[in-house]
């Protein structure tokens, strides 16, 4: 099953949203990456999900915490070829032994290895995504459609969008002062750029180099403009 979500940044003063289609068995861990890519954020700051409506019923928020795998990944990224000290190696061993069982099944906090379909079962089921930047960006998530997957389509995919996202490195005062600069008229180009970002999920060569600030106008990093032609095979498209 394919879920379509309206994912909208809250309280910026201009409408900023993405309609994203994802598979229902996507984990919250991966859903976080999808949201980050759709809004051109880097994932530098901590985040969490709060489920506020599930099964057609409003709920006291169910907190879905960042997975301990985030920490494990920091230590075990195969692209990092440096040698770890014995002390760091002990930290990794401790993570491997303990963090997978960190959360009690009876605790109110869930782990991000849970799938979307566990909580999103009815149209209008909802959650809040909180990204703990200096501005503390809050994002409303609503399930708007459940559809059969298309054979000619790969997921996740953005089907509609409006306006550029706030810069994760700015405080709220600066974001609000500059909010008119977030307004975009070319929504087709915006959707194209978002889908490029989504298509690169999992490509560490892209996300670990110049791609990390995929644009300020819609997060276009101008350092790509200086690349030689044979270096731009995977570079983001420009306006």
Image: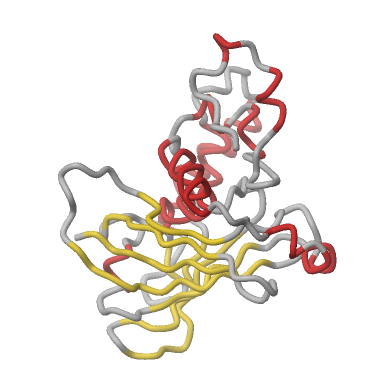
171 vs 143, left or right, is: right
Q: Residue 113: percent from the left, percent from the top?
A: 37, 56
Q: Residue 37: percent from the left, percent from the top?
A: 52, 47
90 vs 191, left or right, is: right
Q: Residue at x 46, y 30 (%)?
A: 203
From the viewer's perspective, is residue 91 above or below residue 203? below
From the viewer's perspective, is residue 203 above or below residue 141? above
- Decide which of 70, 202 is in the foreground and name it: 202
Count of marks overlaid on the render: 0
- Decide which of 238, 236 is in the foreground and name it: 238
Point out the image quarter for the N terminus: bottom left
Point out the image quarter for the C terminus: top right
- Decide which of 156, 132 is in the foreground and name it: 156
Q: Residue 124: percent from the left, percent from the top?
A: 34, 81
Q: Residue at x 29, y 79 (%)?
A: 123
Q: Can you tell which quarter of the image residue 87 is in? A: top right
From the viewer's perspective, is residue 165 above or below residue 210? below
Q: Can you tell which quarter of the image residue 104 is in? A: bottom left
- Decide which of 96, 204 is in the foreground and name it: 204
Q: Residue at x 65, y 38 (%)?
A: 220
Q: Residue at x 43, y 53 (%)?
A: 29
Q: Residue 157: percent from the left, percent from the top?
A: 36, 50
């Amino acid at each position: 099953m394919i879920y379509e979500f309206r994912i909208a940044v809250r309280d910026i003063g201009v409408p900023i949203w993405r309609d994203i289609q994802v598979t229902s068995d996507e984990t919250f861990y991966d859903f976080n990456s999808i949201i980050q890519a759709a809004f051109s954020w880097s994932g530098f700051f901590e985040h969490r999900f709060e489920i506020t409506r599930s099964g057609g019923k409003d709920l006291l928020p169910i907190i879905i915490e960042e997975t301990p795998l985030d920490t494990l990944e920091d230590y075990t990224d195969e692209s990092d070829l440096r040698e770890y000290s014995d002390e760091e190696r002990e930290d990794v061993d401790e993570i491997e032994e303990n963090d997978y069982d960190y959360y009690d099944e009876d605790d109110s906090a869930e782990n991000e290895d849970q799938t979307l379909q566990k909580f999103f079962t009815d149209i209008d089921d909802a959650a809040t995504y909180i990204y703990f930047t200096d501005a503390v960006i809050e994002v409303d998530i609503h399930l708007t459609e459940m559809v059969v997957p298309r054979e000619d389509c790969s997921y996740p995919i953005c089907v509609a969008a409006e306006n550029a996202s706030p810069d994760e490195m700015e405080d709220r005062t600066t974001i609000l002062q500059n909010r008119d600069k977030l307004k975009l008229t070319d929504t087709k180009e915006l959707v194209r750029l978002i889908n490029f970002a989504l298509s690169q999920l999992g490509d560490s060569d892209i996300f670990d180099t110049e791609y990390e600030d995929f644009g300020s106008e819609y997060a276009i990093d101008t350092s790509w403009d200086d690349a030689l032609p044979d270096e731009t095979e995977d570079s983001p498209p420009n306006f």
